[in-house]
Structure formats: C-alpha cells, structure tokens
Amino acid sequence: MGRIDLKERAAITAISCRSYRIPTDGPEGDGTLAWQSTTVVVVQVYCEHHFGTGWTYSSDACQAIVNSELADALVGHDALDIAGLHEAMVRSCRNLGRPGVVAAAISAVDIALWDLKAKYLGLSLLKLFGSCRVDVPVYGSGGFTTYDELTTASQLASWVGEFGIPRVKIKIAESWGREVDRDLKRVALARKTIGPTVELFVDANGGYSRKQAARIGQRLYEEHGVTWFEEPVSSDDLEGLRLLRDYLPVDVAAGEYGYDETYFARMVAAESVDCLQIDVTRCGGFTSFMRASAIAAAHCLEVSCHCAPSLHASVAASTVNLRHVEYFHDHARIDSLLFDGVPVPKNGVLTLDPSLTGHGMTLMEADAAVFQIG
Ligand SMILES: [Mg+2]
C-alpha cells in the first residue's frame, strides 16, 4: 500500500513558538543547583481551523530549533500522522545532538501535535490515548533546600491538608552533600509536620557520593521512615544506583534526564531503579513517554511522572504501570499563571474530565504577555 497523500487530509499549516520567563516565588534550590526563574517554551501547531498547544520547561534556545529544523520537518504534512512526524523531527536534528534543548523542543511540539489531533477528532487526550484510570495519584514536591523551617512546614502542611495528598518529597544533599546535619534536621521537620502515616520521599539530585548515600539512606529509612530516595548519587552512575538499590530498603528512583528511549533502556537494563522517572517535557513528548513506560513495563517496573503535572495528567491516566505524578510546586504555580484549565489535586488525585477536547488547557495570552521574552 502506498503512502496516503497527507497534504490532502489535515496538513500542518504553521507552527508558532514563544518563550516566557517566570521568576520564582522565593529562593529555589536543591542539592546541586539553584535558580531564580523558570523559562517555559510554548509551541502551537496549526491545521485548518484547529491548533494544538504544547510546552516545555527549558531554555528559549528551543525557539530557534522549533522555528527552523522542526518547522521544516512538519509543515505541509498530515497533522494526524504523529509517529511519522516525531521520527521526522528526530532525524532533522541529527547533527545538532538530540539530548537537552533539542529533545525539549521536540517534546513541546510532540505534545502540541497530540493536543491538536485530539481536538481535530473532537476527543479528550484521555480518550485518544485510551485510559485505564480517571483519578491520577500525585505526590507533593518542592521542599527546597533554600527554604527556612516555616516555609518548608507550611508547604508540606498545604499539600497534606489543603490538597489531601498522602505522599510528599523534599530536597536534600544541600551544597553537594556537605550539609548532612541540616539535611537530616529538615527530614525530621518534614516527618514531624506530616505525621506518621504520610509517605515521605527525598531527592538528593545526585549530590551524595556512593558510601555517603548508603550511610544517609539507612538513617533516612530507620529514623524517619523515608521510602523513596531519588538520585542518591548521579543518575549517570548506573552502577552506583544499582548498588544502593540492592543495599538500601528504600526505593531508588531516577530518570528525569532521559532525553530518548535508549537512555531509559540502559537505565532499566542496568537494574538501577525501583521506579523509572520519565519527563514528558524532556523525553520526546507523549510519543516517547509511552515507549519509555513500555520499556519499564517489560521489566516489571512502575513509572513516575517527573514534574509538569498538568501535562502528565492525561498520559498518566493511560499508563497501566503508573505509580504517581510529581505535583511540583514550581510547575504547578507557573502553569496556573500561564494557562486556563490547569488541573488541581483533590484528595491526593488529579481527576480528568473525559468531556474536554485535547488536554483541556489554553494559553492565557494577556496574562502570559508580561512574562514573554521571545
Ligand atoms: Mg529529581
């Protein structure tokens, strides 16, 4: 069978891309990085009288890639042919190098393509993907090392009290693992604030050495009931993660820097994680997210969606081996400033509405304009 003449069906007519820089609402930092703002790159893909919207949290350098390589690969082709469009985007960037900014740009466009396809067909993304649940469990995430005690405690209390979330995560390994006493004091504060039954997670962002992580991980579990130890060592140290996974009773998690399917395949093959983290705004969009979760499923592993809760909600609802979605303070706040229709957790879950079209979120142009940088 020959290729359908895609241009006669639903040809992509244009792609637009804008960048917004949103200052943090206070000092934000983790064990190995600090930041004062977050840049959101918003892509819109047009076809007939429809358009789809996608975004990524990256650098405005994404714009140049979207407007040149990716636009050249997509305009004029059938908007519904996402597998082919995704592959065309990846091939067009061969000489740029896929990980990092390129993958973030591809992710934003891929998300926009799926939103567009769902809207074109008059479906929610939930129905287009095919759901296995309507309620998506989340965990509260923030707890920056830059917070004072009052800020940390009030954020934790709000996740548990206001949103009914039964699991929370704070950052540790402050200053590349040189403030262990403060790390443990902050974990103790978190446990005291949330009480004995709420699950407590920590994220070291790769700030500890192997043996240091082993010693601290033991104490985190025994003294504070921590059950999730994210990037105890660098996620590039697959063997170190595996050793810690074998040694510690806590779950070891990583995967947030996965920019293509081969990254996840290597991490899973090395037996480095108990739960694979995937970020739809980095890995290559919904198309690559579904492939990465299939890799995990084939190895009897669950997946957790890294950050970007608004964008992950629909695909999480269609992922059988999902554990939870990270309700990240920074992204939840930013999304509500820029977009209408952002889901908010109630009783610890994001509840999806199958009657929406697409992912159900629209850019609030006037509100967003004050943050626009390109
Ligand atoms: Mg992390």
Image (spheres, helix red, strand yellow):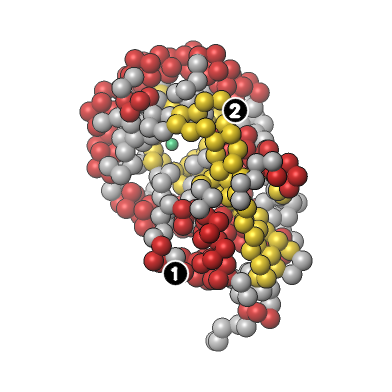
Q: Disc 2 marks which residue?
A: 25
Q: Which numbered mark, 2 or 1, is in the foreground of this view?
A: 2
Q: Amino acid at mark 1?
A: Arg
| Rendered residue at 66%/55% (across/down) | 53
Query: Mark 1: is the Cβ under 8 angstroms from ligand 1?
Result: no
Ligand 1 quarter of the rendering: top left
Can you name the residue that lies furthest to the left here?
211
Question: Would residue 220 be found to the left or right of residue 92 on screen?
Answer: left
Residue 294 rendering spot, x and y as whole percentages: 45, 55
- Tag 1, which secondary structure? helix
Q: Evaluate whether residue 121 shows in this view.
A: no
Q: Residue 250, position in %: x, y? A: 36, 29
Residue 274 location, quadrant: top left
Q: Earlier in the sequence, mark 2 or mark 1?
A: 2
Q: Does residue 237 appear left or right of residue 160 in this picture?
A: left
Q: Is residue 201 left or right of residue 215?
A: right
> Picture coordinates of residue 269 (x, y %)?
30, 51
Q: Which residue sits at x=73%, y=55%? A: 357
Looking at the picture, does residue 104 appear above or below residue 322? below
Q: Residue at x 73, y 48 (%)?
A: 365
- Residue underneath mark 1: 91
Kind of residue indicated by mark 2: Asp
Identify which residue is drawn at 34% across, 19% down: 179
Q: Is residue 337 visible?
A: yes
State the CA–CA distance, disc 2 to disc 1.
Answer: 39 Å
* Residue 213 falls left or right of residue 64: left
Dots 2, 1 in contact, CB < 8 A: no
Element class at badge 2: strand
Mark 2 closeness class: few <14, some 14–19, many ≥20 residues within 10 Å: few
> Quadrant of the image for the N terminus?
bottom right
